[in-house]
Image: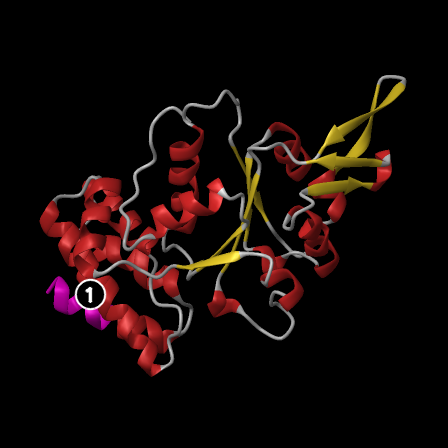
Amino acid sequence: MNEQPFYLPFADEVDVFKAAYESRLPVLLKGPTGCGKTRFVEHMTWEIFQKKEISDPLITVSCHEDLTSTDLVGRYLLKGDETVWQDGPLTQAVRTGALCYLDEVVEARKDTTVLIHSLTDHRRVLPIDKTSEILQAHQDFLLVISYNPGYQSILKDLKPSTRQRFVSLTFDYPDEELEAEIIEHESGADASVSSRLAIIGKKVRNLREHGFEEGVSTRLLIYAGELMKRGIDARRASEIAIVQAVSDDANIQEAVSNIIDVVWP
């Protein structure tokens, strides 16, 4: 990670994260999909680790329902005639002093999330049952997890015993002016196009009042800008990157299309 990842703060999240890291407090990021949580983690990793000698300062795991504790901790592998231990991503981060980012942690199995408890209190250890090792976390190690509250359900939620081990930062989509600046930088589209895309983003998110909970992500608006920069017509790019991407519901697609018709008549 040689170049600083682009990130525009919307509040005091940068200072809060730095303070949490200095105290080695595990961090929970909450927010809708595509609002900048992952980019924020990349940015903060660069801020914190740029002067430290570590080859992989950020280890990211995209959690899913089939993720097991073995996937995180590690397993024995056959190499030739011998069996060797291979660290999983969590163990690698704990051992080397990296930042471990568990993205969409509520998607993981409950027995998997319990694994991180001993890393999030004063002990800062990772028990590795298969090797009978109690691995003490490197002094630079930090655990960060994220999830989308919009996808919460009774079956997919963080247990209080897990949630209350983290300090929490809440993210949302940026305001129109900030989002236009982000779109312009990330997509390479000009300021006028970026501004219109930010307007579309704001108007589509206002459909939440009519039952469309998720809205449109900043990521999709950037995609639309990138298509336009490559010569795709504005209306067509918006249809591909926004209308067809946000929902399969015909009524929602029609409502989003109407917004685009107003912005790009």
Closer to the camera in the image, 171 or 109:
171
Position of residue 214 measured from the top left corner of the image (x, y, whole percent): 39, 68
Quarter residue 100 falls in: top right
Where, quadrant-wise, is the N terminus in this rendering?
top left
Query: What stretch of residues is rendered in magenta?
Result: 257-265
Query: What amino acid is labelled 1 in the image?
Result: Ile
Q: Going 47% across and 69% down the picture, which residue do you hit?
A: 150
For disc 1, the neighbor class at 10 Å (few under 14, some 14 to 19, many from 20) is: many
Residue 81 appears left or right of 230? right
Residue sitting at x 15%, y 58%: 196
Q: Which residue lies furthest to the bottom in this view?
A: 210
The reply to whether the magenta stretch includes residue 5 is no
Callout 1: SS: helix
**Extreme residue toward the top, this view:** 80
Please tell me which residue is depicted at 14% across the width and 51% down the height of the picture: 193
Q: Is the magenta stretch mostly helix, strand or loop?
A: helix
Q: Mark 1 points at which residue?
A: 260
The front one of 94 and 196 is 94
Q: Report whether residue 67 is seen.
A: no
Residue shown at 41% from the left, 51% from the top: 37
Q: Where is residue 63 in the image (x, y as percent from the top left)?
A: 60, 51
**Is 40 situated left or right of 68 in this image?**
left
* 20 over 80 or under it: above or below: below
Pick whichever, 101 or 184, lies toward us. Answer: 101
**x and y percentages locating residue 47 in the rendered image:** 38, 34
The image position of residue 92, as x and y in percent, is: 65, 32
Quadrant (top left/top right/bottom left/bottom right) for the C terminus: bottom left
